[in-house]
Amino acid sequence: MSNGHPSTNSNEDFRIVLPQSRLPTHWYNILADLPTPLPPVLHPATRQPITPADLAPLFPMGLIEQEVSSERYIPIPEAVRDIYRLWRPTPLIRAVRLEKALDTPAHIYYKYEGSSPSGSHKLNTSVAQAYYNKLEGVQRISTETGAGQWGSALAIAGDFFKIAIEIFMVKISYEQKPYRRSVMQTYGANVTPSPSDRTNAGRTILARNPNSTGSLGIAISEAVEVAATSGGTTKYSLGSVLNHVLLHQTVVGQEALEGMAEAGEYPDVVIGCVGGGSNFAGLAYPFLYKNLTEGKQTRFIAVEPSSCPSLTKGLYAYDFGDTVGLTPLIKMYTLGHDFEPAAIHAGGLRYHGMAPTISALVRSGHIEPRAYTQNACFEAGVMFARQEGIIPAPETTHAIRAVIDEALAARETGEKKVILFNLSGHGHFDMAAYDAYLAGRLVDNGFSDADLVKSLATVPQV
Ligand SMILES: *Cc1c(COP(=O)(O)O)cnc(C)c1O
C-alpha cells in the first residue's frame, strides 16, 4: 500500500462499468418469491378484487399482465434493451473518498442512476411503458408530474417510440420551475398546469378555489380522467408504486449483483430512499431474492422523510392511490389518501402511500424502514458532493444520510461492513433546494400525532 491508494481487501477497481453485452435480458419479479402472496387489489366501488378487464381502460394488456404475473423472470424486449443501451449498464462506484472522510472500515458502493439522460432511474420504466403502449396501438399517454422528474422521463420515452405524451403538472411547480417544463417540451410533450379546465376533476377544483395551486393527487385525477374518457386512444401511466414499475427497475439491482461480484464483495446492507418505492425495490429485490432463496442475510433499509412517514408512522390498510378516490384500493402503508405532506424539497418522496410489495415486506420484517428530517439529509448530501463530486437529488440525500449513519456505526464497532445504495438521481435541477439549505433557510417540518390521527381518519373501512 505504498502507491497512495486507500487500502482495500478486494481488487482496486473503484468504478465498475459492465460491458453492454452484460445488460440484463430479463426483469426480476419478486411476486414469484414473496413469503406470503399479496392481498388482492380491490375495485373502488364494488370492493371486490379487480380483474384485468377493470384495468384495461387505463393500461395496455402487456403491463396489466406484468402487474399480476407470478413468473420469476420476464424477458426485456429487444427494442427496450436497445434504448437501455444509451446509458446502461450504469456505473457501480465505490465511494472511497467518503469512506476516508468518515474514517470508517465500511466499504460504500453506489449504483449511479443519475447517469441516465433524464438524470434519474425513472427512464428505466418510462421506456418500457411507452414500448408496451406502442405495441398495442395506443396513440397518447397521459400522466401527472410534480417536480417534473417523472414527466421528463416519460417525455423522452414518448419521443423515442413516437407516442404523444400529455402531462398534467402541479400548477405551483409549473409556475415556479419553468425550466422543468421546458425539458419536457424539448422532447415534444404537451404540458398543462393542473388544476386545468380540460377535465371535470380540474373544473370542480377550480370552481371551489380558482386560485388552487394544485397537488399531485389532483393532477393524477386529471390524467386518469383523460385516459378513461378517451375511448381507448389514450392510456394512463404511473412512475412508481405499481408492481410493473418496480419490476422494470430491477435492471438496477441485477447489474449491481454482477458489479459487486466483479468487486469481489457482497453487500451486508442495501439502502435506498422511498417515495412510492421504485428505485429502492429496483436495487434491493435482486439481492432480497438471495435472502429469500439462498439464505443470505443482507439488511435492507428504506428511507423516507420524517414529514411524510408512511412506513414508519402510517397504517397498513386498504387505501386509494389518488386524492379524489378514483383508483383501485391497494393494501399498503398509508398516511391517508388526502394527506398533504409538508412542502419539503424532496418532491419525489411526498406520497401518502407505498408500493404494495414494499409494504408487505416491511410488514414481514424483511425491510427496515427509517425516517430523517430534511436538514439532516441535505447535510449528508453536501458531504457526499464534497467528497465524491456528484450533487445528489434531494430525494437521494435521504439514502445517503442512512449510508453515513451505517458507516459511522461500523466505525464504532470496527466492522468492515459492505454498504450499497442507489444514487437514484443527480440534483442539478434542485439547486434552489441546496440554495435554501446553504442559506440556513430550510425548515424541518414536524409530523404530530394530531396530524396522523386526522389524516388516517380518511382511510376507508374495508
Ligand atoms: C421520483 C424519484 C424518487 C422517488 O421515487 P421512488 O419510486 O420511490 O424511487 C427518488 N429519487 C429520485 C431521483 C426521483 O426522481
Image (cartoon, grey):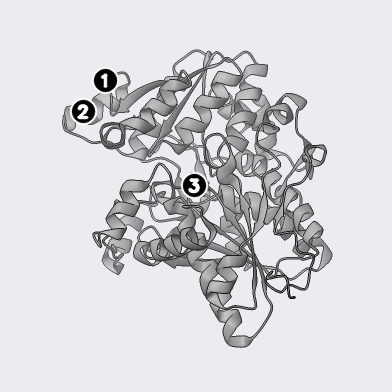
Q: Residue at x 73, y 47 (%)?
A: 17
**C-alpha span from label 2 to label 1:** 8 Å
Q: Earlier in the sequence, mark 1 or mark 3?
A: 1
Q: Position of residue 148 (x, y in %)?
A: 41, 35
Judging by the rendered image, the residue that carries numbered circle 1 is 197
Q: Which three-letter amino acid code belongs to the residue tagged 3?
A: His
Horizontally, residue 85 falls left or right of residue 332, namely right
Judging by the rendered image, the residue that carries numbered circle 3 is 426
Judged from the image, the secondary structure of the residue bearing numbered disc 1 is loop
Q: Which three-letter amino acid code belongs to the residue tagged 1?
A: Asp
The answer to whether 1 is drawn above or below residue 432 in the figure is below
Q: Residue at x 50, y 38 (%)?
A: 328
Q: Residue furthest front?
A: 3
Disc 3 within 8 angstroms of ligand 1 (CB)? yes
Residue 245 appears in which quarter of the rendering? top right
**C-alpha span from label 3 to label 2:** 35 Å
> Answer yes or no: do the residues labelled 2 and 1 have beta carbons within 8 Å?
yes
**C-alpha span from label 1 to label 3:** 34 Å
Horizontally, residue 41 falls left or right of residue 143, namely right
**Disc 3 versus disc 2: nearer the observer:** 3
Q: Earlier in the sequence, mark 2 or mark 1?
A: 1
Question: What crowding class fits label 1: few (fewer than 14 Cα within 10 Å), some (14-19), or many (20 or more)?
Answer: some
Residue 206's label in the rendered image is 2
Q: Quadrant of the N terminus?
A: bottom right
Q: Position of residue 415 (x, y in %)?
A: 67, 82
Q: Residue at x 29, y 67 (%)?
A: 448
**Nearer to the camera, 418 or 31:** 418
